[in-house]
Amino acid sequence: MASMLANRTFVRRAIGVVLIVAALLAQQLSGFFAQELIAEAAILGIFTLSLDLLATCGLVSFGHAGLLGIGAYMFGGVTVLMGWPPYVAIIGAVLAGIVMSFLVGLLAVRTSGAFFIMVTLAAAEMFYSWGFRSKLFNGADGMGGIPRLDLKPIGLDLDNPEIFALVCIALCVIVWLLLELVVASPFGRTLAAIRQNPSRVAALGGRVFAYRLAAFTASGAIAALAGAFKVQHTNFISPDLVSWFVSGDVLIAVVIGGMGTLVGGPLGAAILVILKEVLSSSFGHWYLFLGAIFAFVALALPRGIVGWLLDMTGRLSQRKAPAVTPVSSVEAEQ
Amino acid sequence: MLLDPYFFAEQILNSLQFSMLLFLLAIGLSVVFGLMDYLNLAHGTIYMFAAYVAFTITQLGGSFWAALALAPFVAAAVGLLLYFLLLKRVERSGHLAQVLLTVGIIYMGTDLMRIAYGDLPKGVAQPEVLNGAVNLFGILYPSYRLFLIGLGLVVMIALYFALERTRLGALVRAGVDDRATAETLGIDIGKVFALVFAIGTYLAGVGGVVAAPIFGVYPGMDVTIIILVLIVVVVGGLGSLKGAILGSLLIGFADTFGKILLPQFAMMMIYLVMALVLTFRPTGLLPARRFSTSG
């Protein structure tokens, strides 16, 4: 047991399994309105995974809404403006996400730290100002009537909120499992090495730029996928999807959950969606309370909920088996 | 349009005036960032708070000058209180905990101002002495805006001497350059930082007061300005006075002329400038430390 607790990967995945069970229980037991919240949380969860993949190589984006927006606008454009079926639009959205994040990444991943934060913000804001004026997409008024994917041939009616929520949970789980594989792969290990010490990786002959660009591009593909489902959920696109509040929300969800833990993102997403719903329906000035909770989390759990849990389990296992290397203290230096 | 020399000159003055406002906020953020690697997004909240204090002072019958004399001190006091109560606790927790904490403070600050003053924008009258316009070689330019440009220049010069010629300035420069070595030499960077933080919030407070007559006082004015100020800091380079000056000028001009040349894509001009600068200089134009990218 102690050795299991010392294994961070095991603990992370166990938290993931608990989260999936909790999501499925919530989906089965709750009423009609909660289905919308569950779908929203699951889609935000996919979006957080995209951001956390990028964080694996030490880059934090403050413009991820731009990549979400690319997916959203592509999906809306292909379905509503061109009249093509939604499954083509999803493929198109992911491809657009890949192309756009590759192009932005060529410039952005040369920088790091706060500079990367600002470059990504800039890229997203440029897209926002385009979306705000775009005649094609009705500019600031936005465009409605976006259809959902047609899965009736396999017996799933996505216009039914319960089914849609389930599909979103499933998609979030699939992306999570995929990223668990990626993080454990040699590619993922190299990304982690780059996060810990980029100059050493470069000195060892690792191509830091190429790896970071690959991580950014993969992250863009997932963000665009989240965007394609976000607009299916609301049936509506507007430049608000690309505003920096959206980038801030996803970043905050990841920080609350625990950056660099993968499972922390969807956990933070669920907490954020529930918090906003509960606070906004109970208080007039609910941002006051939301802000206080953010501040509390930052002070009490600076490495997020999952980060805190990992520290706790690490300490528990050490008490029983002192020979185990304290992995958490090495990671804590990040 | 731009061929009209009067119009052109007027826009240059407008750009300068906006640059000065950006500078008042950027210098505090930049030095705090450069010295402690602290990403304080709540810097704008201090700016907003000072503007509301100025509004309250003028409502109570005080003059603009009374507000300008008092509000920045109130802002600095609140800033220091925030620093010792909250901000200091995540000094070593990394940028992300700092972002979460300071975004929390932004949310709280905005809603507190909403509760106290309501959602509608408030106005602060500019001082009567500066109500008129000055004839500058044939251009009639509002005196108040000219006063802003002058104020910015004075602050720049004062800061230059403070940084280059005083003991505190030398300590700040040493800390920005190499914090570990400075501490080894017995300098208490924590104390220097608290002082720098106080000066930075004081200047943000000055910015809030002088901006109030031009842009009005409203909840959310903090977020509007902080994005621009962050861009200034990144473009200029962390921790350097010259960087903050150059960055403020670049962004101030890009914003003003962007609105004239490409009214539909005004913000785009600023982001374009930033993208260009960071493509060729990934750590900004004049960073205090050449080899630091904090990552």
Image: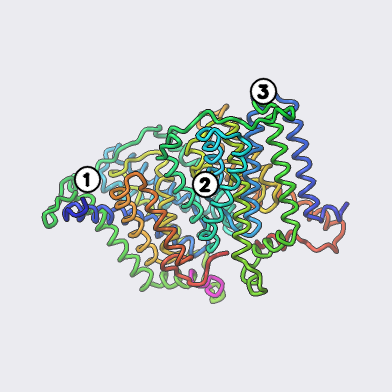
Q: What element carries label 2?
A: helix
Q: Which residue occupies the foreground of this view, B223 or A71? A: A71
Percent position (x, y) of residue B172?
45, 69
A118 within the magenta span: no
Q: In which quarter of the image is the C terminus of chain B?
A: bottom right
Residue A170 shows up from this direction: yes
Quick check: marks 3 and 2 in contact, CB under 8 Å?
Answer: no
Of badges 2 and 1, nearer the viewer stands 2
Question: How far is mark 2 from mark 1, CA to CA?
Answer: 43 Å
Percent position (x, y) of residue B280?
45, 66
Q: Which mark is residue A32?
A: 3
Q: Are marks 2 and 1 on the same chain?
A: no
Magenta segment boundaries in residue numbering: B176-182
Residue linked to disc 2: A66
Of badges 3 and 2, nearer the viewer stands 2
Q: Is mark 3 on a helix, strand or loop?
A: helix
